[in-house]
Amino acid sequence: MHIEEGVVTGAKILLSYGTAAAAGGYALKLAWEAAREKGLASLAARSVLATGLVFSFFEILPHYPVGVSEVHLILGSTLFLILGAAPAAIGLALGLLVQGLFFAPFDLPQYGMNVTTLLVPLFGLTALAHKVIPRETAYVDLGYLQVLSLSVAYQGGVVAWVGFWALYGHGFEAGNLAAIGSFGAAYMLVVLIEPLVDLAVLGAAKGARGLAKSGLFTHRLHHAA
């Protein structure tokens, strides 16, 4: 997912610096909590893994420009379920930055908007997970409807933020609304794929419980809260 060049320009882009700073600050809070829970080495390892995966998602998996942005298979809920909220947030931010620095420098001015659009829905997904997943349930034991709700929350949040930036930049003119609508419709198709990916990954993790103590996965993957 990338906000296209020219969607938000001039002084308006300053808002994205503020939202990105707020999202980054909350990500650091989550990182501090994760380091206290499983140690700094585990956090670092999971964050490096998440960064590599996110970069691969952006560069290797199919992605298409639609309307005001691009449709990517980001797999935010998958990253959350396997690695935890903090490593997922760090991976999304750093993976996006690495791609911008080395492969898409034209995206760097939009980095604040893009990182906000990726991270804030992740934080919403994290809050939802606390409500829809019972404390006695490990993530490997989740059902389809539970992972679907997480995927809808994340992808819906991404679409909402893209729509916000587009409206903020160009207002409610008919062409802009049509571009937002076409992006939203195309992007929500990801919801048809992501829950199936989540279940497949969780199924593989369930068969690899011996790795639970490796520090490469979130504690909740194999254990109750």
Image: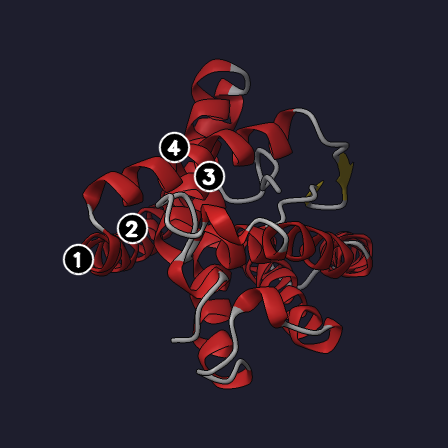
| Gap between marks 1 and 3 measured at Cα | 19 Å
Tell me which residue sits at (44%, 28%) in the image: 108
Q: Earlier in the sequence, mark 1 or mark 2?
A: 2
Amino acid type indicated by mark 2? Gly
Frontmost of labels 1 and 3 is 1
Q: Residue at x 51, y 68 (%)?
A: 125
Circle 3 — which element?
helix
In the rendered image, the vertical position of residue 173 relative to residue 100, given as above or below: below
Mark 3 in CB contact with mark 2 (< 8 angstroms) = no
Return the disc, 4 or 2, that comes first in the chain's sequence.
2
Drawn side of residue 177 relative to residue 7, left or right: right
Q: Which is nearer the N-term, disc 1 or disc 3?
A: 1
Give the class, few, some or many, for how many residues have Cα within 10 Å of label 1's Cα (few <14, many ≥20). Answer: few
Are there few (<14), some (14-19), or many (20+) residues within 10 Å of tag 4? some
On screen, residue 172 versus residue 136, left or right, reads right
Residue denoted by label 4: 48
Residue identified by numbered label 1: 36
**Label 3: which residue?**
50
User: In the image, which is nearer the foreground, mark 4 or mark 1?
Assistant: 1
| Quarter occupied by residue 224 | bottom left
Q: Position of residue 84 (x, y in %)?
A: 42, 56
Q: Amino acid at mark 4?
A: Val
Q: Are marks 4 and 3 in contact (CB under 8 Å)?
A: yes
Q: Is residue 153 left or right of residue 124?
A: right
Badge 1 amino acid: Arg
> Which residue was labeled with disc 2?
24
